[in-house]
Image (cartoon, rainbow, N blue to C red):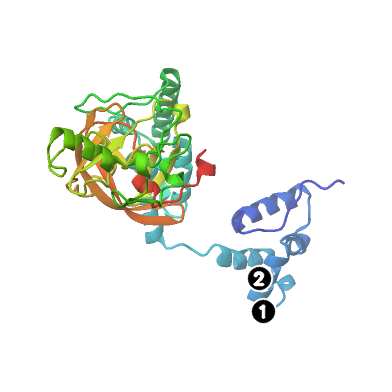
């Protein structure tokens, strides 16, 4: 009779011990193997690493002298020690949907977290309550809270349908919301031939410029050459106006370093979804997807995003003026300073909060502190 199926070595990094034993039991049944041979089969297929561990655990006895059930229990106690109930329930109650997770992925994680919570007959209600509390879509959350006699299965169905409808609508309409402000800021298409503010060259950004460490002797500042010196342009303008340099606020384009007392930064907003590069950052342990914008001098979020995700962080005054690419003024409400984690990097970074709503932008002030994984982003 031909053998049915195949059992590989046990690898704890791939699957749990209990799942491996479940597959082995089906293999033994499918091949009609006598119970007297179950121990021999288990010891033969588990692999050298698992067998060596078992041999050490049962010394001075031999593994072959143990029953099938005893071997399973000994290795289960080693590979899957009984979890601490309070800790498992704590993790379950902190399980919120991550930015990158779909509804189905979030449900799978919730069920996995609940497996060791010993909820018993209240499992469905526990899953439902955590699902409603942890889902990231506010509109969906409001809908679920308005449902009478809501079950976990019904909540999952509603959220899944709303996620699908939202995705389809975005694909049909083609764009996300744009920045809004008192200055009536509109989206602008990014210029394909970016001009470097350090040398006035094209086809490279300022972070890659050969002159970023160059000191221009006339102004004494590092990071540009003569033809790109804005101090010279500002002084020429002030001379014509016959006003003092520090008291004047007439210059329209001043980099963030020009005046530490009241900074003016240029902010651009990308237009097309397929032209955007995005990355997810953990800001004070809250995941946030941001657009990478080398044209933005500062990293910013909208006020609506602040209220939704970071209202627990106090807003500090920000002496910064922001202008959009088209020259319109953007209202800055303040800034917060938080620990930002990206992959294995961490830094305390400022984040401006602006009036209105729209995509979150990762600007040059963050890009100088964090090395992004461009291969993954692109």
Q: Position of residue 82 (x, y in %)?
A: 49, 63
| Front one among 188 and 304 | 188
**Residue ID for mark 1:** 59
| 104 vs 369, nearest the viewer | 369
Secondary element under disc 1, as helix, strand or loop, is loop
Asked if residue 143 lies left or right of residue 317, the reply is: right
Near mark 1 (Cα within 10 A), the count class, few <14, some 14-19 or many ≥20, is few
User: Which disc is residue 44 wearing?
Assistant: none
Q: Residue at x 48, y 40 (%)?
A: 105
**Above or below, 113 relative to 134:** below
Report which residue position mark 2 lands on. 53
Q: Position of residue 77 (x, y in %)?
A: 56, 66
Query: Would you say residue 187 is visible in this rendering?
Result: yes
From the top left corner, tell me how far across and down residue 121 is, in percent. 41, 47
Disc 2 crowd rating (10 Å Cα; few below 14, some 14-19, many 20+) is few
Of tags 2 and 1, the one toward the viewer is 2
Pointers 2 and 1 in contact (C-beta within 8 Å): no
In the image, residue 2 lies at what x, y percent? Answer: 86, 46
Mark 2 residue element? helix
Residue shown at 66% from the left, 70% from the top: 53
């Amino acid at each position: 009779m031909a053998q049915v199926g195949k059992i590989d070595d046990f690898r704890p990094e791939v699957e749990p011990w209990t799942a491996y034993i479940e597959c082995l039991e089906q293999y033994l049944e499918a091949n009609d193997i006598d119970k007297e041979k179950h121990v021999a089969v288990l010891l033969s297929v588990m692999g050298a690493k698992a067998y060596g561990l078992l041999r050490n655990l049962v010394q001075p006895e031999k593994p072959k002298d143990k029953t099938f059930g005893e071997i399973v229990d000994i290795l289960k106690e080693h590979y899957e020690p009984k979890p601490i109930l309070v800790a498992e329930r704590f993790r379950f109650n902190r399980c919120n949907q991550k930015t990158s997770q779909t509804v189905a992925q979030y449900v799978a994680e919730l069920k996995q977290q609940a497996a060791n919570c010993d909820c018993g007959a209240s499992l469905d209600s526990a899953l439902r309550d955590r699902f409603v509390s942890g889902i990231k879509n506010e509109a969906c959350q409001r809908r679920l809270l308005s449902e009478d006699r809501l079950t976990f299965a019904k909540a999952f169905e509603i959220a899944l349908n709303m996620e699908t409808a939202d995705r389809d609508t975005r694909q049909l309409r083609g764009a996300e919301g744009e920045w809004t402000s008192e200055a009536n800021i509109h989206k602008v298409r990014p210029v394909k031939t970016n001009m470097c503010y350090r040398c006035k060259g094209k086809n490279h950004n300022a972070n890659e410029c050969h002159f970023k460490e160059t000191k221009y002797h006339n102004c004494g500042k590092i990071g540009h050459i003569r033809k790109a010196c804005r101090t010279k342009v500002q002084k020429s303008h002030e001379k014509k106006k016959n006003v003092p340099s520090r008291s004047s606020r007439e210059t329209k384009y001043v980099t963030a370093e020009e005046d530490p007392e009241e900074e003016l930064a240029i902010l651009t907003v990308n237009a097309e979804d397929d032209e955007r590069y995005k990355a997810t950052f953990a800001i004070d342990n809250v995941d946030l997807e941001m657009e990478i914008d080398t044209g933005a001098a500062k990293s910013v979020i909208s006020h609506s995003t602040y209220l939704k995700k970071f209202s627990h962080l106090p807003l500090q005054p920000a002496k910064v003026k922001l202008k959009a690419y088209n020259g319109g003024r953007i209202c800055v409400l303040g800034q917060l300073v938080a620990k930002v984690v990206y992959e294995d990097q961490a830094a305390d970074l400022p984040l401006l909060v602006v009036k209105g709503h729209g995509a979150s932008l990762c600007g040059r002030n963050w890009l100088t502190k964090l090395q992004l994984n461009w291969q993954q982003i692109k």
